[in-house]
Amino acid sequence: MSGVRILVGTRKGAFTLESDGARKQWDIRGPYFAGWEIYHIKGSPVEPDRIYVSQSSSWFGQQIQRSSDGGKSWEPVGNSFAYEGVPGTHQWYDGTPHPWEFKRVWHLEPSLTDHDTVYAGVEDAALFHTTNGGKSWQELSGLRGHGSGSHWQPGAGGMCLHTILLDPVDPKRMFIAISAAGAFRTDDGGTTWRPINQGLRSEYIPDPTAEVGHCVHRLAMHRSRPNVLFMQKHWDVMRSNDAGSSWHEVSGNLPTDFGFVIDVHAHEPDTIYVVPIKSDSEHFPPDGQLRVWRSRTGGNEWEPLTKGLPQSNCYVNILRDAMSVDSLDACGIYFGTTGGQVYASADGGDTWSAIVRDLPPVLSVEAQTLK
Amino acid sequence: MIRVVLPAHLKMHANVNGELELEVDGAVTQRTVLDALERSYPVLQGAIRDYSTQRRRPFLRFFACERDLSHESPDAPLPEAVANGSQPFLIVGALAGG
């Protein structure tokens, strides 16, 4: 029987939540790597029992863990992330030059075709990859060195490369996003890159329509239609129909167009989900009501999904890597909160329930559909 | 035999309990002790010293014999009591929080 495994990264360790296809009873395991920040944990789409973990600490630096048995056991692998050549400088918060310094891995994206190949998005923003299961990591330096790197600047969470989308049709194409630089695309497997931010408008940079400098929070695509991208920006929900070459706003009737997560239904490429968040400084749901908003039209027309979610006194945040979908026939949607809840919907978002309520603050959620 | 005490996070990471005992050839310094530690426990590479600079990570401190040795030269001899194994070399996470 098919099932689902949810991989959860938190401020104080990793957890796995497993269920059969009914998704009613969940077996919760963890914490793994207790006390460490788990920015991301993700399994290989080729071999789901191969799981990679970014384990980090301000005290003890970066570690990468790997499991080959679905999380029953773990082994530390390579944790050296050395920038290619002279790292140079990017902009600091006040606009002054600041040297590039590795801090942590924000996102791990296993290859669609090889379980030993993984891409890693790091802070300070750069893209690394391994082809030997994490034993060693090399920078794809064409991104950082393509020309605009000295103008990138950190967002509130740091200057992080947080999103990596691999094109399932064109193996040479990939998309990444950096806070606060914007979105970038390669068409040659990561050797060369170009910014893809035309159509974005950000009032917090000197030139609101500049080529780089935009605080992109998250990108999403449906694997059947990789030229269509969705973006949750610092402000604005955006859509591109041409692989990021141009963007237009689809925030429509959302109560606020600020937020972090965005994801796409597994079987309906025009059904997308966001969780609007009040900002600039609050970073909690408007009116204390936790609502996922769904568009079935690829944006612009949105409906609030509330059944099973707290509709009063809820002041959690949902961070950028903390939403995921499974691919069972009735698509499951999952998201984690900074209050330690992981919510699930087994009916495309119509109804929700908490799988678990009292984890440490959730940093990332990834759903694996198990055969 | 040199005695080394790791902070809790690194004990867990290296899968060890209690004090470690290490053989160090030649002069006993921060560098030779940490080199020996990382040879015995390669998973600790990068966790105590920065990979690229080999300098102590900023939120870690080194204590021994009731002294803070964090800012001593990595090539300065450690106290005789550490070298002869009567006192441990302590690797400590800097205090943070309330």
Image (spheres, coloured by chain):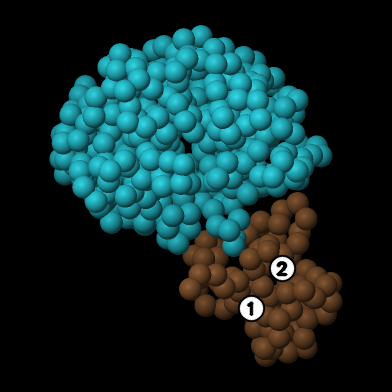
Q: Is residue A248 visible?
A: yes
Q: Are marks 1 and 2 on the same chain?
A: yes
Q: Quadrant of residue A60?
A: bottom right
Label 1 belongs to which residue? Answer: B90
Query: In the image, A311: left or right of A258?
Result: left
Return the mark for residue B34.
2
Q: Please identify which colour was used for chain A in the image.
A: cyan
Q: At 62% from the left edge and 32% from the top edge, which residue is drawn?
A: A205
Specify the subunit that label 2 lies on: B
Locate residue A320, reporting x and y percent: 44, 38
Tell me if residue B20 comes above or below residue A76 in the rendering.
Answer: below
For the residues marked 1 and 2, what is the alpha-carbon distance in whole angstroms?
Answer: 11 Å
The chain carrying label 1 is: B
Q: Tell how many labels.
A: 2
Residue at 78% from the left image edge and 69% from the top image edge? B31
Where, by quadrant of the figure, is residue B4 drawn? bottom right
Q: Residue at x 33, y 27 (%)?
A: A254
Q: Amino acid at mark 2?
A: Leu
Quadrant hosting residue A214: top right
Residue at horizontal 71 percent and vertical 57 percent from the top: B50
* Closest to the observer, A220 or A238: A238
Quadrant containing the C terminus of chain A in the rendered view: top left
Horizontal side of B65 relative to A44 (left or right) equals right
Q: Is residue B38 above or below residue A334?
A: below
Left or right: A82 with respect to A275? right
Q: Is residue A2 visible?
A: no
Q: Which circle, 1 or 2, is nearer the viewer?
A: 1
Shown in brown, the chain is B
Residue A209, x across and y down, in percent: 61, 21
